[in-house]
Image (cartoon, grey):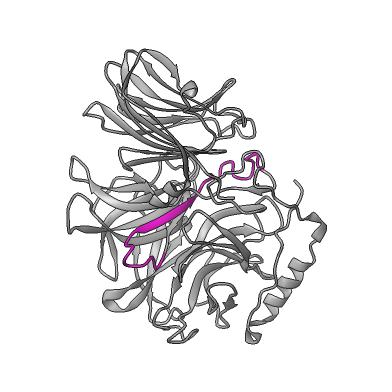
């Protein structure tokens, strides 16, 4: 695989920060041949048109999501030198709406001996760190330093006082070192009741998270541990901890601990689980013992939430890596590899049994991408398949809101990205009470034997209806069922000509209650 290089603007660090490791890292970066740099067209085969992708090269976990001064910051695990994992650094982009992104230079590069692994970022509004000033609060990134020459991971910080455009590594790094080889992915937030910072960090092979507190982001004190719990087959990574409202119980809230599994997730390979419970400023306690999955597709990992979203907005927003470690290095894209998911707004909902579950909805900003609108009124769906393409329901980048009445059918659903021998099926199995996404025939799949697959999740359709909110892009399908109660995220690699849509029923007749479709504009 050829190596591609993102144009690497020099870091404008303060003089005191030009330590030997940083100088060595910049010298290392500048040694790579400039001739290898391609010019992306953003129209490459499989390039997502409204999901974030790097211009070139490898990307994985979202990092350091923070809102400041009118901008959403997205940092991400990035290899500046090629389309496979390595040389982990923090790539960087900013957006006014989480959709239209401006690529910025690499923010935190790998040094000669330490990679910049995953982490988070905060606005230090009270300048507790002393890195900024009362009228210019610093942005502080908290991330894992991964030592390449010995088995050690420790937590580092860096800071910025120019709206995140340049970053200064803290001269006292690491700020938290427990002498562990697998101790990573710190998520930090301000706990207002006790006026302190709280960090949740994964002890990956132990299937635990540790919580720490700090008054200044530099000195950290152990608070408590959580785990093992839930799914412990795969390693634990990329934790997040936040409070959410229970939308059908006014005035009630719960805390959510999100922890990702590096393997053996619900759809196979990597994925995320979550725990609902209580946090008292010291310890998190789950109120259930069962495993609860964030996303039932195969391609949603390492999700973290944005810090410092303005109170007047009030949403808890996050994004995940739209890929799976099982085949992440093999997906057929070039000169970039990997995308981030759609940004999602989070809440909780009590189900019919009283259990409180996570709800994810695509952010309302996506409506600004809507272009051509088509609406179909109610109609029967005879057993078999009805092609909707002739009625203007088609596209490679589109949004669909569909309500299906099950009727006498044993299975009912929707097929997208249809073409010669290709289709992705989004359906409901009424006998088994399962919603599913089937990508066995979705397009190119030979690059890895585990890619072709079917994913499913339990879904109650006791009222005889199935509601689906579907986003189709050039190489992905994201499905939100039952108003966000179930989510499926899936990569697909169909022919550009496969843009058809149909509805179908098996085992009897069903009914299309309504269908709205919008073509979606490219953000590039």
Please check the rendered image and state whether residue 308 is part of the magenta-colored stretch, yes or no: yes
Q: Is residue 73 or residue 268 the one in the foreground?
A: 73
Please give the range of residues in magenta.
307-333
Q: Is residue 398 above or below residue 206?
A: above
229 left or right, relative to 162: left
Q: Is residue 341 above or below residue 453?
A: below
Task: Give x and y (percent) for residue 492.
Answer: 55, 35
Task: Give x and y (percent) for residue 148.
Answer: 65, 65
Tally the numbered discs. Answer: 0
Q: Is there any visible trace of residue 177 in the rendered image? A: no
Report the residue at 59% width, 31% height from top: 494
402 left or right, relative to 253: right
Taken as a whole, is the magenta stretch helix, strand or loop?
loop
61 left or right, relative to 78: left
Q: Is residue 254 above or below residue 523?
A: below
Q: Is there any visible trace of residue 299 in the rendered image? A: yes
Q: Is residue 289 or residue 395 the one in the foreground?
A: 395
Q: Is residue 285 or residue 187 the one in the foreground?
A: 187
Report the residue at 66% width, 66% height from top: 149
Task: Give x and y (percent) for residue 48.
Answer: 57, 44
Please check the rendered image and state whether residue 242 is part of the magenta-colored stretch, yes or no: no
Task: Give x and y (percent) for residue 117.
Answer: 56, 63
């Amino acid at each position: 695989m050829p190596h591609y290089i993102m144009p690497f603007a020099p870091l404008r660090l303060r003089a005191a920060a030009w330590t030997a490791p940083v100088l060595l890292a910049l010298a290392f970066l500048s040694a790579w041949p400039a001739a290898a740099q391609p010019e992306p067209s953003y129209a490459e085969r499989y390039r997502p048109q409204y999901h974030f992708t790097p211009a070139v090269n490898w990307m994985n976990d979202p990092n350091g999501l923070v809102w400041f001064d009118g901008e959403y910051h997205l940092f991400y695990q990035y290899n500046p030198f090629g389309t496979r994992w390595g040389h982990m650094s923090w790539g960087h982009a900013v957006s006014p709406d989480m959709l239209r992104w401006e690529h910025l230079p690499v923010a935190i590069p790998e040094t000669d001996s330490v990679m910049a692994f995953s982490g988070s970022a905060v606005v230090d509004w009270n300048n507790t760190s002393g890195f900024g000033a009362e009228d210019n609060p610093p942005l502080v990134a908290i991330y894992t330093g991964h030592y390449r020459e010995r088995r050690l991971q420790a937590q580092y910080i860096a800071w910025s006082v120019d709206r995140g455009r340049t970053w200064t590594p803290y001269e006292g790094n690491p700020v938290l070192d427990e002498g562990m080889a697998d101790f990573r992915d710190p998520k930090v937030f301000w706990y207002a009741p006790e006026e302190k910072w709280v960090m949740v960090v994964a002890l990956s092979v132990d299937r635990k998270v540790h919580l720490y507190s700090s008054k200044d982001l530099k000195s950290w004190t152990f608070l408590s541990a959580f785990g093992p719990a839930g799914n412990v087959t795969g390693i634990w990574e990329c934790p997040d901890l936040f409070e959410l409202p229970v939308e059908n119980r006014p005035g009630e809230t719960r805390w959510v601990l999100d922890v990702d599994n590096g393997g053996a997730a619900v759809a196979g390979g990597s994925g995320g689980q979550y725990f609902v419970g209580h946090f008292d400023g010291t310890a998190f306690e789950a109120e259930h013992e069962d495993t609860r999955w964030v996303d039932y597709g195969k391609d949603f990992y390492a999700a973290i939430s944005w810090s410092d979203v303005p109170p007047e907005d009030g949403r808890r927003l996050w994004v995940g890596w739209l890929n799976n470690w099982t085949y992440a290095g093999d997906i057929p894209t070039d000169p970039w590899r990997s995308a981030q998911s759609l940004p999602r707004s989070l809440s909780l909902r009590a189900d019919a049994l009283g259990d409180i579950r996570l709800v994810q909805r695509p952010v309302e900003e996506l409506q600004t991408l809507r272009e051509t609108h088509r609406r179909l009124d109610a109609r029967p769906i005879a057993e078999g398949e009805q092609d909707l393409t002739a009625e203007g329901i088609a596209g490679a980048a589109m949004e669909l809101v569909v309500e299906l009445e099950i009727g006498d059918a044993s299975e009912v659903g929707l097929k997208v990205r249809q073409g010669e021998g290709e289709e992705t099926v989004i359906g409901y199995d009424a006998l088994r009470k399962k919603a599913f996404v089937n990508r066995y025939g979705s397009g190119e799949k030979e690059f890895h034997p585990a890619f072709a697959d079917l994913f499913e999740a339990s879904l109650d359709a006791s009222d005889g209806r199935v509601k689906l909110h579907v986003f189709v892009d050039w190489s992905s399908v994201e499905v939100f069922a039952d108003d966000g109660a179930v989510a499926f995220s899936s990569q697909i690699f169909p022919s550009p000509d496969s843009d058809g849509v149909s509805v179908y029923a098996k085992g009897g007749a069903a009914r299309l209650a309504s269908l709205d479709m919008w073509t979606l504009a490219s953000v590039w």
